Amino acid sequence: MNSNTPSSSAGGPGSADATAPRRNSKRPKYSRFTQQELPACKPILTPKWVISTFLLVSFIFIPIGIVSLFASRDVVEIVHGYETECIPSGSRNDKVGFIQSDQDKTCIRTLTVPKDMSQPIYVYYQLDNFYQNHRRYVRSRSDQQLRSPENARETGSCSPEDTVGDTAIVPCGLIAWSLFNDTYHFTSNNGGQIPINKRGISWQSDRERKFGRNVYPSNFQNGTLIGGARLNESIPLSEQEDLIVWMRTAALPTFRKLYGKIEVNLRQGDVINVTLQNNYNTYSFNGRKKLVLSTTSWLGGKNDFVGIAYLTVGGLCFFLAIVFVLIYLIKPRQLGDPSYLSWNRNPGGH
Amino acid sequence: MKRFVYINEDNLAHDLYCDNRISNRKYTIWNFLPKNLWEQFSRFMNQYFLLIACLQLWSLITPVNPASTWGPLIFIFAVSATKEAWDDYNRYLSDKKANEKEVWIVKQGTKKLIQAQDIRVGNLVWLRENDEVPCDLVLLGAADPQGICYVETAALDGETDLKTRLIPPACVGIDFELLHKIKGVIECPSPDKDIRRFDANMRLFPPFLDNDVCPLTIKNTLLQSCYLRNTEWACGVAVYTGNETKLGMSRGIPEPKLTAVDAMIDKLTGAIFVFQIVVVIVLGIAGNVWKDTEARKLWYVRYPKEGPWYELLVIPLRFELLCSIMIPISIKVSLDLVKSLYAKFIDWDDQMVDLETGIRSHAANTAISEDLGQVEYILTDKTGTLTENKMIFKRCFVSGTFYGNENGDALTDAELLSAVSSGSTDVIRFLKVMAICNTVIPVQSKNGSISYKAQSQDEEALVRAAARLHMVFVNKNGNFVDIKFNASTIQYEVLDILEFTSDRKRMSIVVKDSQSGKIILLSKGADEAILPHAYTGQQVRTYAEAVEQYAQLGLRTLCLAWRELEDEEYQEWAVMFKEANSSLVDREWRVAEVCQRLEHDFEIIGVAAIEDRLQDGVPETIETLRKAGLNFWMLTGDKQNTAIQIALSCNFVSPEPKGQLLMINGKTEDEVCRNLERVLLTMRITSSEPKDVAFVIDGWALEIALKHYRKAFTELAILSRTAICCRVTPSQKAQLVELLKSCDYRTLAIGDGGNDVRMIQQADIGVGISGREGLQAARAADYSIGKFRFLKRLILVHGRYSYNRTAFLSQYSFYKSLLICFIQIFFSFISGVSGTSLFNSVSLMAYNVFYTSVPVLVSVLDKDLSERTVMQHPQILFYCQAGRLLNPSTFAGWFGRSLFHAIVVFVITIHSYAFEKSEMEEVSMVALSGCIWLQAFVVALETNSFTILQHLAIWGNLVGFYVINWIVSALPSSGMYTIMFRLCRQPSYWITMILIVAGGMGPVLALKYFRYTYRSSKINILQQAERLGGPILSLGNIEPQSRSLEKDLSPLSISLPKNRNPVYEPLLSDSPNSTRRSFGPGVPFDFFQSQSRLSSSYSRNCKDN
């Protein structure tokens, strides 16, 4: 600002003709940005645009909804809850006592395949009402320790499952400690084994980067309280895939975790015998356990929500479009009518 | 409290009083850090963030990494501390410059050159012409033998005229050499800030006369920051130094101004804080209950049986930290950033450049641009602000002839020129009065041209005009004035000056013609002060009519008169005058009475009309701003009549049938009280009528009203949209601002002179006009502009846009913070109310810092309406004034929107990412990207005009989000390693995003469309009209129809002044029902009499002067 003043003060209160030529030179550099005059497009909400937007959305959403719904319906899913059935009827009054005892917990269940299932068939276990996202739980792990054997003592965040005596627990923390330990074996009705492939069920990135190849479990489940599964101390963590899967904590209290893959096709009506070890204690907190066999589609597993939501939104948009068309036809209103400006109204107009 | 100053005593008083070091600094190097931190932490927001940051250091409760709060916090503090330090450093530099200025003082009897900061009380200081006075001095000697010197006090009080200062009588005649050795004592009051008062005594020691105590007044002082002018040298003794001078005492660091928007944001922040506490308490209790009933059964969580004593606090504190993001830490940084951009836009604006002088508009205070859009009252100075402050003699009426009526300029009127050259006695006498009857000092420069230094611009205009008409006031030498007419020089001896006072409204001068020895009384003054005193027999009617006619044109008029005095009459009177002048009691009243004895039987010579031109575009600006619902108050030191006249000519008040002026005058409490009540009554009656009622009050009455009838006056201030306050002092101006502010109005004060500085600093917004009265006002102001007319653009364009943008930006900041916070809260319900954070630290920090702040920052380019539309429909400013875009109810809308969007994001995320896909990191990223998508569309929906930058910011930001997350996902050490790559490969991720956007935006769009089209606000209508090219655009050209007041929208509706009737209409009326007073040519003075009913002692009229 000051740069302009010296030259002008020299001119003083000049005469009118002296100001005329100066006028141009005085004009500062013009820039559309500084003058807030950048070219701008100024869309407004006209009925045409809004109604066609809603129509367009509904025309796109309804087909997507239908396709998603079909994809979800194509998925064949067998869900079998067993937490009550696998308790011997005599112990059902004291499920917790049973699960904490040393009795044999083998349990045989029978599943019938409702539809043809083509491989790969994913085997999940589903836990309900299990808070893997609880704050005390979700932070009770040590990623450094899992990654490298040098960091075995990095157990600061693992309390209360950090050390036994003075030696660190590997893998430490509540998550690892509470590793799910039910096991499943599938045999077909004719007695043949249905093999479960338990390799490659965890994320490749976890195996390669998060869980060290030369980190071996030590001191695990050696404390006074035994949580879940034990680990084979001769296998490095990067190959303990059940642990890797388990340690991908779930955000919701109901979740499924991959147990393995069945790599044979199953026919409709096939009967599968499941021999399971019902070891995991979900009884103290009324949790439920389910065994899930499921195929997959381009959208993932069976989930009708997306399809229904798409149909709902699409329908709603269509409905809104129709409503707006009707309002537009019944009660047309001129946009930008100056008579709506109150200060333009005539004295008698109100 | 008194202080005794021993003149020229080097050994005394050195440590008693401070030295002359001026310091405006707020900090020193040592106290900067603690003091600055203390100041920053005295703000609630900062205390809050500090508390949060400290809590986060406790790892038991922190849901995220403490760095996510500490980083931004330290950044914010560093930025504002740096700014403070820089400002203080600049103050230090300017202080240093003033302190190291070299001045001559006397030490041990010899003159020495020292730095200004080393002056001590009691030192003798020598000044030369054009020197700045370094501290407050009592004059002891001056070059002028009579001990007169001239000072310019502009920096002190803003008055540019030269003031005379006198040596105290005891010092008159002391020899130049002896002054070095002068000794004495001055008894003066302790330092104060009253620049018009200095009650002190001086006693000189032998060998100087020490017979008596010599009283001193402000007339005997030279105050710091004044300039010595037209005086070769002067010397004085320092009485107040450093920060104890009158200037130093009256200087205070102005309070930082807080805008209404800031206050509202603070209020909303407070509300959010309360909401947050409620949430924390509810969730804390729920969490503890859930823990004891449910979580203890979860064997895998392994809650210990017995927790520490603070166990109950842990969960609430966790939620406090989790919810701390509800109050966006970024809002202050974002606001500071956009506010400085608003200020830059003002600086850059090419349409607010004064082309004559090249002065650009400047926003000195970068923090209060939004307030410009919310102004309700504008308090404006008159002279130099509305007018150009260039008095020009335009017309005159001499012995029955109007000069200058045809071409509008008497100086080029051939008739007058020929009358001058032909030597018409009346005209010559008229010119002589113009040239002599004044207190102007002619200054002859080296090249022979004469410039005039005058106390009043009117006198200067008259003297200049006389010079143009060949009656040149050449020289003033003591009591002798030389006048050159054509080629001959006439000398007069000035015998007495009968000074101008506001009560007498005239000034006279008694001169003796050096050649003929005749004694003449020359007078000039307001018509009501001159015309009634004409000698019996003179027809004053024609003069009254001339005055009337000129007043209609908005010219300031002066009647010029003359009387030849008999020698004896004068001698007799002169004795009385001297006596009156030396009287100690009631001096002013006595002098006035004596003057009255001489000022009668005038021979009226003529009427001079002076124009103070309005600045370009003033009436239009005022009209537009009044349409925009702004109330105007004019605060002027000028006379009532002039003020009213100017008010009329610049649309300030409407002429009679539409407008009505109510007078509040009076010298006593009773009168003022009666007047006030009457006006108040009228106001109450008329407030429902579409009438333009304004009140007029003068300084005296104002003083009384503010002191004794503050309540009534406050009510009046609220009722009236227009007011004219005349003859008010700077402090009264500030008091009026204070009064309006206390009624919760947003005030803008605009002025150009130093006398406006206090009101400018007091007002919510101070605007200074960098004008002829110097730059004090512009320096003290928050905004400085070149011309009054830029105010329109400043308020309607810059103020309005700033308000709109800040309103959006601040609410949006809360929206996005609430959005993510609600998701966290919802998540806590499915995570055992244990205070787990769904989002990781990196995402949370980046969400506030990068993902959501960039798109909204470009909203500083958003324009809801084009500048042209706003100018055509200034009423639209009402939305800003009334705070329609940022208030609890709009905020509730944003609150609701964030709640709705949080529900949409959360529900869709946990359902589409259920079962085998419910992996924590993935769900967290799905929810986060849902938020990012939604906020991009929200910004897009709320943007009115898309420039390329906005597209870039909104959609580029979305791309940026993915890029940043891909980068983070590529780092094996980060928690979210490979997550984003996995997600982007899943069709279900993209399907979910589209679903979130459609589900979140569909209802919002539908609602907005419905309100936009069927419940449209005025802004919407204008937008539609502007963009569809509706009939509204042409409205600007159509003459506005007669408009009415609308009760529901009263601030919006203003009655427009009609085309002003060319015939002057009287403005005064004593009741709302009063009929127009007629000004029949036969009853010129009927007017005065009829007025006297209203106020007995104060006669007024509505004519100019």
Image (spheres, rainbow, N blue to C red):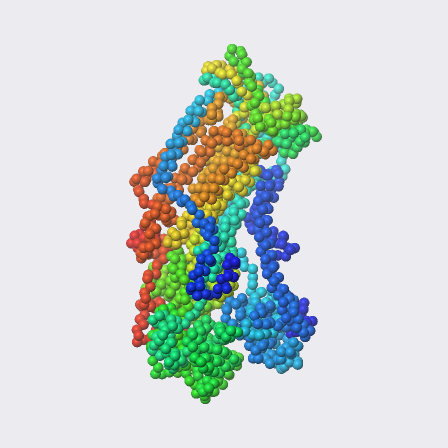
Total marks shown come to 0
Instruction: Tell which of B585 and A341 is nearer to you.
Output: A341
Tell me if I can see residue B1078 in this picture.
Answer: yes
Which residue is at a point 37% across and 77% down the rendered structure image?
Answer: B418
**Quadrant hosting residue A141:** top right
Q: Residue furthest right?
A: A166
Whole-percent x and y of residue A196? 55, 18
Q: Residue furthest bottom?
A: B568
Which residue is at a point 38% across and 68% down the rendered structure image?
Answer: B554
Whole-percent x and y of residue B856? 48, 44
The reply, left or right, for residue B275 in relation to residue B1054 is right
Q: Is residue B593 above or below residue B839?
A: below
Whole-percent x and y of residue A327? 32, 40
Which residue is at a point 49% across and 44% down the rendered structure image?
Answer: B813
Which residue is at a point 36% across and 56% down the rendered structure image?
Answer: B1053
Whole-percent x and y of residue A131? 55, 30
Instruction: Tell which of B968 and B1049 is nearer to you.
Output: B968
Tell me if I can see residue B280 in this picture.
Answer: no
Q: Residue furthest top?
A: A190
Instruction: Tell which of B85 and A247 is nearer to you.
Output: B85
Q: Is residue B34 above or below residue B708?
A: above
The reply, left or right, for residue B42 in relation to residue B607 is right
